[in-house]
Image: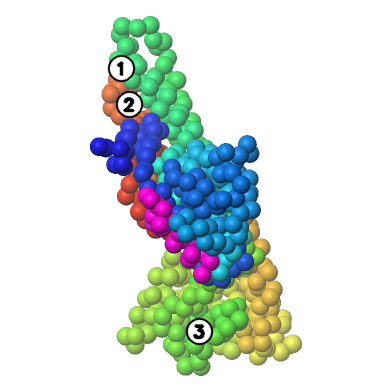
Amino acid sequence: MFKNLVTTISKNRSFGIRYISTRSETIYALSSSPGKAGVAVIRISGKNALEAINKMTFPSKKPIEQMNTEPRRAYFRRIRHPQTGEVLDKGLVLWFPGPHSFTGEDSAEFQIHGGTAVVQSVLNALHGLPDFRMAEQGEFSKRAFDNDKVDLTELEGLADLLNAETEMQRRLALRQAEGGLRKPFEDWRNQIIKCMAMTEAVIDFGEDENIEDDVLTDVRNRIQQLYQSMSLHVNDSHVGEIVRNGVQIAIIGPPNAGKSTFLNRLAKREAAIVSDIPGTTRDVVEVRMNLAGYPVMLCDTAGLRESSDVIEMEGIKRAKARIQSADIKVCLLPLDTPLSIDSVIREVIDDDTYIILNKEDITTNSDENLLTAYKSKLLKETGVQKVWTVSSKTGKGVDVFINEMIDILKAKYDTSLANPIMITQARHREHLEDCLSSLKAFLNMPEEELVLCAEELRQAADALGRITGKIDVEDVLDTLFGQFCIGK
């Protein structure tokens, strides 16, 4: 009587055992983008996947299960309606028997013509098969996770790969999707579990069995080394998260410095309103750019100055908030006003600030020596690393700024991406910090408190397990699979 029920076998995930599910329903979905295309891919996963092939490609010779051929080969077939036998299309059919498939289940693909009517007719035909239903959003990936084909970090990498807009995002996501985070995290976790087992052995058998006296010393030394290694990776200046989400570059400066014109010049469109009236920009205007593969979010902010206007003061407040969160700040100073930096601007300049002297089109050759002297003075007084001279109006000097800003991005982020353990999610960092906190508590614990020492190691192992999905990840799954399209 329980034959058709969905059964779930739950085991203790804290030692790497997943939830293993057997399902009665076979799912299907359009896996390629909807709309007209040369080719469309329909994926099927579940125990009846082979039945879909046999019922929808008859009477073409023999069913695939009767052919002496290897799986994962493409067969050119007429795709037919399983009830009427009507030919719906001609295309390729592929068969992936479980567990050697993406989901770990028996899977199949129909690669057909990408016309809207063709795709819909095949989907309707699949809907008419017993125990077949349309997949939910992210359900193929969820089945892969449930069947231990991928872990949580690989799923997050896959989601990032689907959403990658630049070359650096693609590289970072692909590394994670291929297990770049899973392997070191699992290695760390296994080391902690071994140390925990040794500690618990002393608790249980220390008085009765012949256990070496230096076991606990060896455990403490291993945990000390592990703590130092993990700390180095946590102190990474958030490079992985910055590249994943985009480098925030805030354009700052006094009113009428030409910030909005500069933003429009970089964006190559009228993204921000330009006016000679001071205080025109009241809110933060954002433009996404791709600079040599680096995702960049340019933020035009309100001019910084003392003001009594309520609306302008709110704009300045928002500008300062964005400046605080920016990864890089570009400060524009106009050359048509006295060359000085007031206190409002000076207080937001730090090591991540670069200066642009704007409106070069108003200068003459006789001003060159003065500009050179002023640049040197700015570098010395503010401590900024670079000063450019540009004209947002004519575009002069803007290409030089872009090329040199790309070099700055490479220096700040490209070398850091060589780190094999690159934290890309705030969730990862939170759990790693929890793990480090437990390891530190273990190292500070008196040796005679063996039970508490073992508990700290258990909590450290659990914290790492939450990153890869070994334990307590149900609250993360719905959010994660919501990023996938239907058919993935």
Give the amino acid type for the residue marked by disc 3 in the picture: Ala
In the rendered image, which residue does mark 2 sit on?
Answer: 454
User: Which residues are the magenta region?
Assistant: 117-138
Q: Quadrant of residue 15?
A: top left
Q: Residue at x 30, y 8 (%)?
A: 207
Q: Is residue 212 visible?
A: yes
Q: In this rendering, would 198 be left or right of 329? A: left
- Could you tell me how far apart the alpha carbons at marks 1 and 2 are, in whole angstroms? 9 Å
Are the residues flagged by discs 3 and 1 in contact, CB closer than 8 Å? no
Q: Residue at x 55, y 55 (%)?
A: 110
Q: What percent of the width, then of the height, locates residue 244?
A: 51, 58
Mark 3 or 1, nearer chain start? 1
- Within-10-Å neighbours for mark 1: few <14, some 14–19, many 20+: some
Are the residues flagged by discs 1 and 2 in contact, CB closer than 8 Å? yes
Q: Residue at x 47, y 46 (%)?
A: 51
In the rendered image, which residue does mark 1 sit on?
Answer: 203
The one nearer the camera, 92 or 303, is: 92
Q: In this rendering, would 358 be left or right of 34? A: right
Above/below status of 372 relative to 135: below
Give the amino acid type for the residue marked by disc 2 in the picture: Ala
